[in-house]
Image: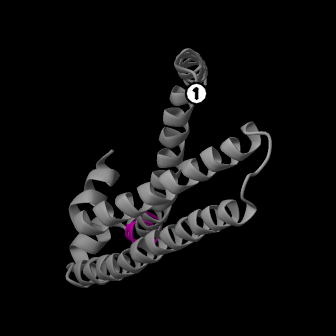
Amino acid sequence: MQLFKFIFNEFRTATIVVAVVGGIAGAASALQISLINKAVADGGLTSIPLFLAEFLGLLAVIVVSRYASQVILATKTEQKVAALRCDLSKKVLGLSLLQFEKITAAKILAVLSNDIIRLSGALIMLPMITTNLCILLGCFAYLFYLDWLLTIGVIFFLAGGAFVY
């Protein structure tokens, strides 16, 4: 949880932009599912060119928004990781020999290698998590539109599965 607080504090605007762009990708994915369902449920397509235009338009929105969110966050992540590595290196170089011997080289190496890699790994996962969460919420909204009782049942089954897991 502290990692997500750190990410949000350090990348406030980038996090919000990535969440919005990921939300757009998720909403477009849910709309695409709705479009396909509508085409199948109507017993055939009345206008194939209109369907293709809508489908390809949503596909373009999904691809561009996912790419944009990943590029934005990857750029910010690399900048922050470089800044953290420089900051940690300056701190290590500023240690006296006595402090360095107390901390031990193994702990310093662990901080320099593992912690920054974990942080960058968490940052890279953020666009995917946001997009998938928005897809899930969009699909739930569409399922609720189709049958609210089924939606409640699915939510209970998911909650039970998460609890058992």
Q: Position of residue 34 (x, y in %)?
A: 61, 44
Q: Quadrant of the N terminus?
A: top left
Magenta highlight: main SS: helix
Total tally of numbered discs in the picture: 1
The answer to whether residue 122 of the structure is visible from this angle is no
Give the quarter of the image for residue 147.
top right
Q: Is residue 28 left or right of residue 40?
A: left
In magenta segment, residue 60: no
Q: Position of residue 88 (x, y in %)?
A: 29, 76
Residue under the point 74% across and 61% down: 48
Give the quarter of the image for residue 150.
top right
Which residue does the numbered mark 1 point to in the structure image?
Answer: 146
Q: Which residues are magenta?
A: 108-115
Q: Quadrant of the C terminus?
A: top right
Q: Relative to 106, does residue 1 appear above or below in the rendering? A: above
Comparing 136 with 85, the one in front is: 136
Q: Residue furthest front?
A: 46
Q: Which residue type carries mark 1?
A: Leu
Q: Residue furthest right?
A: 44
Q: Relative to 139, does residue 129 appear above or below in the rendering? A: below
Q: Position of residue 69 (x, y in %)?
A: 44, 69
Q: Position of residue 20 (x, y in %)?
A: 36, 59
The answer to whether residue 20 of the structure is visible from this angle is yes
